[in-house]
Amino acid sequence: MSVLVTGGAGYIGSHMVLELLDAGEEVVALDNLSSGAAWTAPKDVAFVQGDAGDQALVRDLIQSRGVNSIIHFAASVVVPESVADPLRYYLNNTVKSRALIEVAVKSGIRHFIFSSTAAVYGMTGDKPVAEDAPLRPLSPYGSSKLMTEIMLGDAGRAHGLPHVILRYFNVAGADPQGRAGQSTPYATHLVKVACETAVGKRSHMEVFGTDYPTRDGTCLRDYIHVADLAHAHMAALRHLRAGGTSDVFNCGYGRGVSVREVIETVKRVSGKNVEARNAPRRPGDPAAVIAAPDKIRKVLGWTPKHDSLDIMVRQALAWEEHLLRSSKSP
């Protein structure tokens, strides 16, 4: 039996593919390449270019490849873009997820893991937020993900679809073995942008909002290493395979780092200047979002291995330098 990874050529999805391969799993990676890159797929992975909302394609993959587990990453993920173009986000993140869930139910999929987001919480204050906190998203991105969470919960109760929802906080870093990293052109992830500026791919970067009610006026976020996030998915898959109940878990470390602190870390680790220009706040950005990670550690036994901003930045910088040396640089 194999695992279908939607968005398998994207940033997090490509790391999940590596995690599954390292565990000896058979993997099918599905990606429409709207933001991913086919070259990220290892040679021993069945890569299919296509859309996660294409029910006929997904049904065929499940039947022909013996898929019994789906890990669903495929999505649009830029908060300000979702504010400017909400219907695109509701189509890509909600409508297509609904189509995928329907095929999963009708095909008898036994394990479904959904890539959700801390954006479902909205304005949380500067205290760590637990899974049972009120869900009040501030952007269509957060709302589109929350709608899929609701659909999965309803499908689980009505049709017995076992699932785990993982709410990501801010993902950063690259594969510790240097096999993958954030390769999306024009990515908006803060660590990615700061590292691109440090290696000279950007002349400068912008700090969106300097008047937030935080310790230095910039947003606070909980950064999680992409490899630790992939480990969390494996823990969720093992949980479901062992007969564990459907559940929701935060994926973060439980501490907030400001935008300015990230930039200073990139400067220190790289030894390079990073020109950061102040800019207005972006719509949809809360002042602080920090995870309460106790539940995933207790229930899934997840223990982070790369809990260090310095490590995340060092590996992200190494990946940017790799891209600069490679013809694959976006």
Image (tube, rainbow, N blue to C red):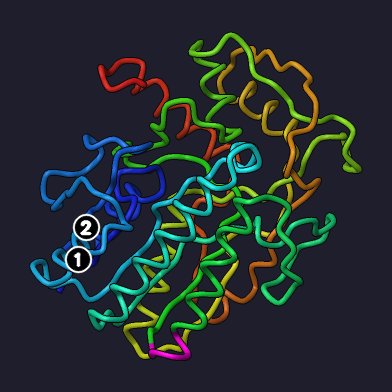
Query: Residue 252 magenta-drawn?
Result: no
Q: Is residue 173 left or right of residue 17?
A: right
Q: How far apart are marks 1 and 2 (CA)?
A: 5 Å
Q: Is residue 165 left or right of residue 127?
A: left
Question: In the figure, residue 70 lies in which quadrant?
Answer: bottom left
Q: Name the residue under label 1.
A: 25
Q: What stretch is highlighted in magenta?
A: 156-160
Q: Is residue 79 left or right of residue 302?
A: right
Q: Do the residues labelled 1 and 2 touch (CB within 8 Å)?
A: yes
> Which sits in the foreground, 305 or 27?
27
Q: The disc labelled 1 sits on which kind of residue?
A: Glu
Q: Residue at x 42, y 40 (%)?
A: 174
Q: Mark 2 points at which residue?
A: 21
> Which sits in the foreground, 285 or 88?
88
- Density class for disc 2 (Cα within 10 Å; few <14, some 14-19, many ≥20) is some
The quadrant of the rendering that contains the C terminus is top left
Q: The disc labelled 2 sits on which kind of residue?
A: Leu
- The dominant secondary structure in magenta is helix
Whether residue 171 is situated above or below residue 117 in the rendered picture? above
Q: Where is residue 239 in the image (x, y as percent from the top left)?
A: 40, 81
